[in-house]
Image (tube, rainbow, N blue to C red):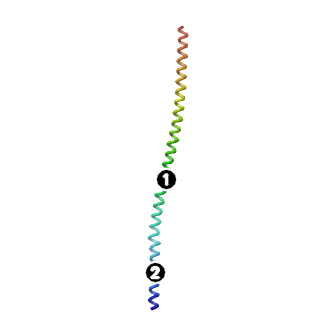
Amino acid sequence: MTIDIIIALLIAVVAFFALVAIWYFIVVPAKRKSLAEEARVNAEMEAEVIKQKKLLEVKEKFLSKRTELEKEVRLHNSKYSRARIASSSVKCSSTKSKTS
């Protein structure tokens, strides 16, 4: 009778260790793999968000600089136009005074 109990206990212990081994070598790596995949996907998504933010910052900076340069060009052109008009009016007045 005691031998039957000992054999049953040994079978139970061996079965327990077999289940632990199966869990450790099959379930845990699969779980690690899924966690690693999830971390990779999250990292890619975060990288894409950062990339989009940086692109937006660059676009805003570009538009700001472009507006600034367009203002400078308009100012330069208006100064050039005024100088040209003044120059032509001086020429006109000098030619009028010569003809008079």
Q: Is residue 72 above or below residue 55?
A: above
* Residue type at the position of mark 2: Val
Tell me the SS state at disc 2: helix
Q: Is residue 61 above or below residue 81?
A: below
Q: Residues within 10 Å of mark 1 (few under 14, many from 20)?
A: few
Q: Please name the residue shown 46% across and 88% down the image.
A: 5
Q: Nearer the viewer, residue 9 or 26?
A: 9
* Residue type at the position of mark 1: Ala
Tell me the number on the disc at residue 93: none
Q: Residues within 10 Å of mark 2 (few under 14, many from 20)?
A: few
From the image, which quarter does the N terminus lie in? bottom left
Q: Please name the residue shown 50% across and 51% down the image.
A: 50
Q: Is residue 90 above or below residue 75?
A: above
Tell me the SS state at disc 1: helix
Tell me residue 6's x, y (percent).
47, 87
Point out the residue furthest to the bottom here. 1
Q: Which one is earlier in the sequence, the residue at label 2 or at label 1?
A: 2
Tell me residue 71's x, y (percent).
53, 32
Tell me residue 29's x, y (percent).
46, 68
Q: Please name the residue shown 46% across and 84% down the image.
A: 10
For label 2, the residue is 14
For label 1, the residue is 47
